[in-house]
Amino acid sequence: MNRLAKRFVVSFVLSMMIVFNFNSSILIGYSDSDKIPVYGYKIIQVYPHDTEAFTQGLVFKDGFLYEGTGLFRNSSLRKIDLESGKVLKIKKIPDRFFGEGITIFGDRIIQLTWKGNIGFVYNKNTFNLTDRFNYPYEGWGICQDGKYLIVSDGTSTIRFLEPDNFREISRITVQENGTPINNINELEYVKGEIYANIWQSEFIAKINPLNGSISGWIDLTGLLKMENVEKKVDVLNGIAYDRENDRLFVTGKLWPFVFEIELIK
């Protein structure tokens, strides 16, 4: 075996070890006796999605999708027609900020930034900027439970904030059988639980908001078929819930589709 071939084999083995260890760390502690369910999925409907949208946050409200996108010099807030994928309204954020998660609270849209330590508040109907606020951690995902804003920072910590003054009220540590789970990313509040994308994985965690314990895993492996992809795509990210019609939507960064799915035990 020549030197180049040896390097390839070593690199391949190391990469497989990393993937194995990463996936194992997500489901660490899981066993039949622990009774933490792992859900599969059924695709109900597929909708078009802008392949230039680096999805960081996703919300469904009043028949429309709202999306926060990332990347420096290309971050935005968008209102989208679900059926066509057409962008109906867009608000660019300053080039120096990397946009992150969004949520809607009343008539306000709240958008985080990654390392900018600043969040933006917009009027939901006009997208006019109405306020800003600061926080001393990275901004990743955000959702709300009707009372508090719920925020992730890429670690195992989830914070609960007052929606008016953004003051931290409490926090939980996301954990599976006592082991902290890191890389908590985009968030959505669904039927009393927090759904969270786990960055760089195909899993969504179902989290108890009272104590941070994981009550279930959603395995979305194979959701996006690569034979249907024409451009470069990034990781699974983006969860939206239609409360009125009990519909769950997921997508990913630069993905060509938004998927409406049903969970299967």
Image (cartoon, rainbow, N blue to C red):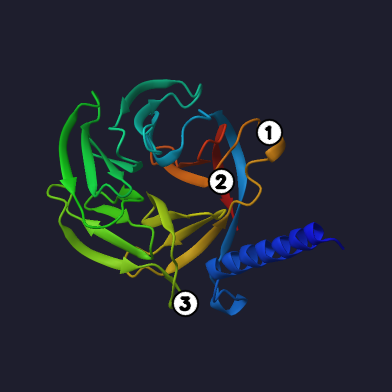
Secondary structure under badge 1? helix
Nearer the observer, 230 or 33: 230
Q: Which mark is residue 228?
A: 1
Residue type at mark 2 is Glu
At 23% from the left and 44% from the top, the residue drawn is 119
Q: Is residue 60 left or right of residue 35?
A: left
Secondary structure under badge 3? loop
Nearer the observer, 89 or 63: 89
Secondary structure under badge 2? strand
Residue type at mark 1 is Asn
The image position of residue 111, as x and y in percent, is: 28, 41
Mark found first going from the N terminus, 1 or 2: 1
Q: Is residue 3 left or right of residue 58?
A: right
Which callout, 1 or 2, points to the residue nearer the camera? 1
Mark found first going from the N terminus, 2 or 3: 3
At 46% from the left and 66% from the top, the residue drawn is 215
Residue type at mark 3 is Asn
Q: Quadrant of residue 226?
A: top right
